[in-house]
Image: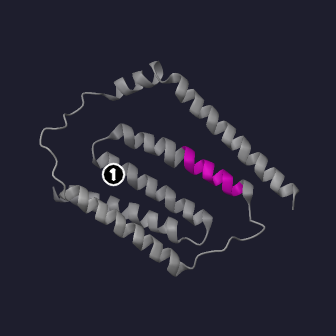
């Protein structure tokens, strides 16, 4: 049991460190790398909670697709012609602390709340059943979401090209 607790603490620290790196980074590339570390940490927490399917979806969708989409957006936009008014490191740290304290208070509230014993039953849904639902009943929404992502990428490229022509 002590090993499991140590693994949980390591994963939680990795997730927290990635989140802090995302918030406090001065470079957008380092912020993106912090976000990737955070998403890997969240996938680790899902594995720790014995939800391997959700962990794999976390890695495939967020770590893979969304991170690559953000990296492409950073590469396409390039250096901004006008830098936005930036927060100082102290303001970022204060904002990160406020979010951390609020999250901790919410976590404590959830832990201390009284759950009704036996109110929730264990689901007998397997990974095979989830896959069958995706390919039988949810095929059209799944394809429409992928089409929407392609349209968003094309729109981002077009906006980047038009903004470079106006310089």
Residue lying furthest left in this view? 117
Please determine whether, in this image, residue 96 is positioned above or below residue 15.
Answer: below
- Which secondary structure class fits the magenta region best? helix
Q: Residue at x 49, y 68 (%)?
A: 21
Q: Position of residue 35 (x, y in %)?
A: 50, 58
Residue lying furthest top in this view? 136
- Residue 97 in magenta? no
Q: Position of residue 29 (x, y in %)?
A: 61, 63
Q: How many discs mark residues in the rendered view?
A: 1
Quadrant in which the N terminus appears: bottom left
In the rendered structure, the answer to whether residue 6 lies left or right of residue 22 reads left
In the rendered structure, the answer to whether residue 79 lies left or right of residue 119 reads right
Please determine whether, in this image, residue 119 is positioned above or below residue 109.
Answer: above
Dot 1 crowding, Cα within 10 Å, few <14, some 14–19, many 20+:
some
Q: Residue at x 48, y 24 (%)?
A: 138
Q: Nearer the viewer, residue 162 or 3?
A: 162
Q: Nearer the viewer, residue 88 or 8?
A: 88
Quadrant in which the C terminus appears: bottom right
Please determine whether, in this image, residue 124 is positioned above or below residue 48.
Answer: above
Please determine whether, in this image, residue 60 is positioned above or below residue 77.
Answer: above
Q: Position of residue 114 (x, y in %)?
A: 15, 52
Per the rendered image, the range of residues in magenta is 65-75
The image quarter containing residue 147 is top right
Q: Residue at x 54, y 79 (%)?
A: 89
From the image, tell me which residue sits under label 1. Answer: 45
Q: Nearer the viewer, residue 76 or 158?
A: 158
- Residue 68 in magenta? yes
């Amino acid at each position: 049991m002590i090993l499991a607790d140590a693994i949980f603490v390591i994963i939680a620290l990795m997730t927290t460190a990635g989140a802090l790196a995302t918030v406090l980074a001065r470079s957008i590339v380092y912020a993106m790398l912090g976000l990737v570390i955070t998403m890997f940490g969240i996938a680790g927490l899902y594995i720790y909670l014995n939800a391997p399917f959700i962990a794999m979806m976390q890695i495939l969708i967020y770590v893979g697709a969304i991170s690559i989409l953000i990296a492409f957006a950073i590469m396409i936009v390039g250096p901004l012609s006008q830098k936005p008014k930036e927060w100082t490191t102290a303001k970022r740290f204060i904002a990160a602390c406020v979010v951390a304290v609020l999250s901790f208070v919410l976590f404590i509230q959830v832990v201390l709340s009284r759950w009704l014993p036996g109110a929730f039953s264990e689901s007998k849904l397997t990974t095979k059943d989830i896959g069958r639902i995706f390919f039988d009943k949810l095929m059209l929404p799944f394809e429409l979401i992928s089409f929407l992502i392609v349209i968003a990428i094309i729109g981002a490229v077009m906006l980047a090209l038009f903004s470079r022509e106006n310089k």
